[in-house]
C-alpha cells in the first residue's frame, strides 16, 4: 500500500568541604568519545551518501557581518530543504507501565513541564495503550534511521513516527539508546526512501551564529524557530529516578525550544545538523540546549548496533583550586584540579593517586581547572595508558593510569 500523498595536607581536609561546596566538583567517570565513531565521516561530511547537501550559506542567507545584521537574511531555503527529514514521534505504553514511564519523570518535567494529552490508541493486538508523550527526530541515514533523544522513547511499548507527506504513521523500533547521553537511534522498517539531513561539524560554529530549530512543539507539527548560538560547552546536571547525570559540552541557543521539540535538529546556515535539541529550562526564556555533533556522531555506531557505550573512568572526583589551597599545599599557582576523593580499587587508586593530590598535567598537557581535567580525560579511549602529573608535598609526581570502562567496574562497597 502506498502511504504517500501529495503534500599541608593535614590542614587541607578541614577546609575541603567548605571550599568544594561552593565550587565545581566533577567525577571523571564520563564516556570516552575519541575513536568511537569508526567508519563515520567527520568535519562536516555526511553520514551517508544518500544525504543531500543544501545550498551554501553564502547563497542561502547572509549572516551577521561586522556585528551588524544584513537585511536579506532568509531561512526559507533551509526550511524547505530540511522539513521532509524531520519527523513527529508519538510514544505509548500499556496501562500497567504508564506510571513508571521515564517520559513523565522529573527530567522531563524539569525541562518541559507536562506534554499535551493525546487520545488512547490500541495496538494491533487490541491492548490498551496510554500516550507517554511526543517528541521529534530526523532521518540521518538511508534505510529509515532516525536520531532522537532517549527520553523521547524511553519506556515506550509502541513508537509511532509521522513523516511529512504520508497519511499513516510508521511503527518504529529502538535499535539502541543511552540515558547517560540522552541519545537514541530508532528505525522504520519500510522500503520507502526518506530524505536524510546532512551532518555538520559543531566544533566550527561560533557564538553568535544563526541557527534554525525544527520540531513539533506542543503538537504543532513542523514548527520552525530561529536564533543564535548563545554559548558553547555548557554543562547541565540532571537528577531523576534513574540516577544523576551530567550533560556536557551542550550548545546553548535562544531559538525557541518547547515540549515536543526534543530530539529535533538544530541546523546551521548551510542546512547541516550541528545539534540535537534536547532541553529548555522551564524557569527561563531563550535558554535552550542541544547535543552537538562532536558528541553524538562518535556514538552512532554503538546506538545502531545496540551496544553499551564505553564510559571512560579513573575513579576520582576533582575540584577547582582557590587561594587557600595554594597556601596550604604550597602550590606554584591556582592552575590544576584538586583530587577531592579517590575510590578504592579504581585505576587512579591502583596507580597511586590520593586525595589532596593536585592534577597539573594529563599526558604532558597542562590542566587549567577541574572542568578541563574532566574534558581531557573523557576524550581518552578506554584501555589507553595516560600519564597524570600531580603536585604532592611540594613537588611534581607522575603516575601511569589505565583508562577503564565504568560499565565494566564492579560495584564498590564503601561500608
Image: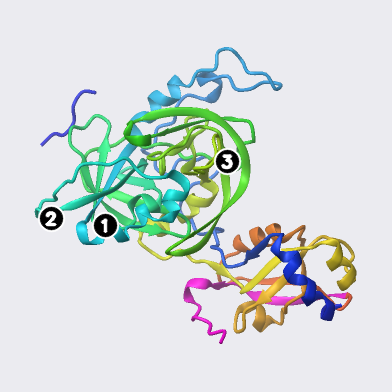
Comes first in the chain, label 3 or label 2: 2
Whole-percent x and y of residue 102?
36, 57
Total label count? 3
Q: Nearer the viewer, mark 2 or mark 1?
A: 1
Question: Dot 2 corresponds to which residue?
Answer: 127
Q: Is residue 399 magenta?
A: yes
* Residue at 14% over, 50% down: 123
Q: Nearer the viewer, mark 3 or mark 2?
A: 2
The label shown at residue 313 is none
Residue span colored magenta = 395-415
Mark 2–mark 1 Cα distance, whole angstroms, equals 13 Å
The label shown at residue 252 is 3
Picture quarter containing residue 363? Answer: bottom right
The label shown at residue 98 is 1
Q: Is residue 142 above or below residue 13?
A: above
Whole-percent x and y of residue 229?
59, 35
Q: Is residue 259 above or below residue 23?
A: above
Whole-percent x and y of residue 337?
75, 65
Picture quarter containing residue 14? Answer: bottom right
* Residue at 47% over, 60% down: 180
Q: Is residue 230 magenta?
A: no
* Residue at 41% over, 39% down: 261
Amino acid at each position: 500500500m502506498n502511504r504517500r500523498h501529495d503534500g599541608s595536607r593535614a590542614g587541607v581536609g578541614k577546609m575541603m568541604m567548605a571550599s568544594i561546596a561552593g565550587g565545581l566538583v566533577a567525577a571523571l567517570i564520563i564516556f570516552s568519545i575519541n575513536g568511537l565513531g569508526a567508519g563515520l565521516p567527520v568535519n562536516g561530511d555526511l553520514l551517508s551518501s544518500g544525504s543531500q547537501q543544501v545550498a551554501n550559506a553564502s547563497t542561502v542567507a547572509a549572516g551577521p557581518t561586522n556585528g551588524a545584521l544584513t537585511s536579506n537574511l532568509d531561512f526559507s531555503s533551509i526550511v524547505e530543504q530540511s522539513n521532509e527529514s524531520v519527523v513527529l514521534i508519538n510514544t505509548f505504553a500499556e496501562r500497567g507501565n504508564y506510571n513508571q514511564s521515564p517520559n513523565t519523570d522529573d527530567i522531563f518535567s524539569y525541562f518541559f513541564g507536562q506534554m499535551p494529552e493525546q487520545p488512547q490508541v490500541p495496538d494491533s493486538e487490541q491492548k490498551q495503550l496510554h500516550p507517554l508523550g511526543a517528541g521529534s527526530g530526523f532521518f540521518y541515514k538511508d534505510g529509515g534511521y532516525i536520531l532522537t533523544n532517549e527520553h523521547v522513547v524511553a519506556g515506550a511499548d509502541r513508537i509511532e513516527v509521522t513523516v511529512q507527506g504520508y497519511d499513516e504513521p510508521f511503527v518504529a523500533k529502538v535499535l539502541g539508546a543511552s540515558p547517560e547521553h540522552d541519545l537514541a537511534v530508532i528505525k522504520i522498517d519500510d522500503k520507502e526512501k526518506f530524505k536524510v539531513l546532512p551532518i555538520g561539524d559543531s566544533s566550527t560554529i561560533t557564538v553568535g551564529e544563526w541557527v534554525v530549530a525544527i520540531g513539533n512543539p506542543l503538537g504543532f507539527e513542523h514548527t520552525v524557530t530561529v536564533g543564535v548560538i548563545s554559548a558553547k560547552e555548557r554543562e547541565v546536571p540532571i537528577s531523576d529516578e534513574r540516577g544523576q547525570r551530567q550533560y556536557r559540552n551542550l550548545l546553548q541557543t535562544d531559538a525557541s525550544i518547547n515540549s515536543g521539540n526534543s530530539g529535533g535538529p538544530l541546523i546551521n546556515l548551510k542546512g547541516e545538523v550541528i545539534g540535537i535539541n534536547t532541553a529548555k529550562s522551564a524557569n527561563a526564556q531563550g535558554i535552550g540546549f542541544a547535543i552537538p555533533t562532536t558528541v553524538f556522531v562518535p556514538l552512532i555506531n554503538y546506538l545502531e548496533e545496540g551496544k553499551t557505550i564505553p564510559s571512560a573512568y579513573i575513579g576520582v572526583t576533582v575540584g577547582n583550586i582557590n587561594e587557600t589551597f595554594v597556601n596550604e599545599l604550597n602550590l606554584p599557582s591556582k592552575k590544576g584540579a584538586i583530587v577531592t576523593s579517590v575510590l578504592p580499587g579504581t585505576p587512579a587508586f591502583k596507580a597511586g593517586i590520593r586525595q589532596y593530590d593536585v592534577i597539573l598535567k594529563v599526558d604532558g598537557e597542562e590542566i587549567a581547572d577541574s572542568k578541563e581535567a574532566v574534558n581531557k580525560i573523557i576524550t581518552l579511549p578506554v584501555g589507553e595508558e595516560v600519564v597524570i602529573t600531580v603536585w604532592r608535598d611540594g613537588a611534581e609526581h607522575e603516575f601511569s593510569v589505565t583508562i577503564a570502562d565504568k560499565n565494566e567496574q564492579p560495584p564498590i562497597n564503601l561500608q
